Image (spheres, rainbow, N blue to C red):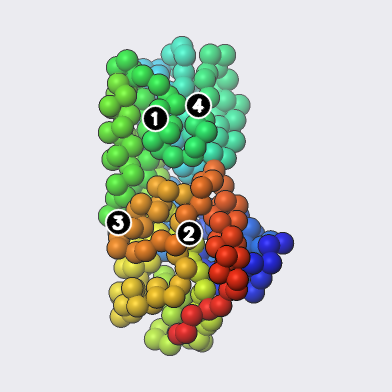
Amino acid sequence: MNPTLLDCCVAFTSPVSYGEFLRSQLESAGAIPLWVPTISIQQSDRLQAKVRQVIAAELHQISGLAFTSRNGIRAVASALSSVDLPPLRTPFYLGALGRDAQLLSSLTEIYPHPHCQVVVPPVATPEALVEALGPGQGRPLLCPVPRVVGLTEPAVIPNFLKAIAHRGWRPLRLDAYETIWCGADCAAALVQGGRVSQPVQKAAAIILTSTAEVEGLLKSLRALQIDPHRWLQGVVVAAHGPVTAQGIRAQGVQVQVVSSDSSSFAGVVQALGQYFQKATQCSAPEA
């Protein structure tokens, strides 16, 4: 246990699809987790049908798949298991970030390919993945990404596709799942009074694991007639990796902690603990 987070109230805004892991990391560090999802990850029937259609009709024409999230891997794995698959090109690339790459086995188990090359960059960022894939030489690369609903599409998505094109690949965007804002009340548990049935301890820190989460947080606080920047005063903002930190700052929010290891949530929890260790104590700000 990391005593620097002992009894610290740490809020986090991750969706249900992977928030459980972050909560367990915080609990192991001695923190009091306050889980306030601001986005949800969903696979609509329409998008699932589209993914199956693309996989069945176009997989034999592409040279690989580049994933920026495990949600995209899951969507493609579901499609692979339900369609007749054509022969793949050689070589065929599978690219993923950090621990997301562990899920690539779900693809290779469904459709083994002797010349499949798994690409995992040493740094878990989209930019590093693009570099690790190497020159594209005009080859098509399928990129499963989210369709964002209720929020602005994070710049990381179009930037990733542009970077792939600049490396000589022909990126093919595939909206494989949906990132959906959880609504006006999603941040209610963070504030005292107002629409909250019972007052809660104000968080000493908040962990944000994606750009969409911070926009969802700010949008909800404003809907609750709470000044986001006033609420954030005295709250330590921790970002899961430099890409998320850049997106948070673009929303006008200051970031005090950035995890250098963005391959898993353990990195941001450790970085937050180190921050409080330097500050000598963890204390919640005045409400």
Q: Which residue is mark 1?
A: 130
Q: Which residue is mark 2?
A: 257
Tell me where residue 1 sits by quadrant.
bottom right
- The secondary structure type at the circle numbered 4 is strand
Which numbered disc, 2 or 1, marks the residue that appears first in the sequence? Answer: 1
- In this rendering, would 169 be left or right of 34? left
Q: Say if 233 sits above or below 71 in the image.
A: below
- The secondary structure type at the circle numbered 3 is helix
Q: Dividing the image into 4 quarters, which one contains the C terminus? A: bottom left
**Mark carried by residue 250:** 3
Residue at the image position 36 percent from the left and 58 percent from the top: 248
- In this rendering, would 266 be left or right of 172? right
**Mark nearer the viewer, 2 or 4:** 2
- The secondary structure type at the circle numbered 1 is helix
Residue at the image position 60 percent from the left and 71 percent from the top: 280
Residue extending farthest to the top is 90
Q: Residues within 10 Å of mark 2 (few under 14, many from 20)?
A: many
Which numbered disc, 1 or 4, marks the residue that appears first in the sequence? Answer: 4
Distance in Å between CA atoms under marks 1 and 4 = 10 Å
- CB contact under 8 Å: marks 2 and 1: no
Distance in Å between CA atoms under marks 2 and 1 = 26 Å
Q: Say if 278 sits above or below 118 in the image.
A: below
Residue type at mark 3 is Ala
- CB contact under 8 Å: marks 1 and 4: no
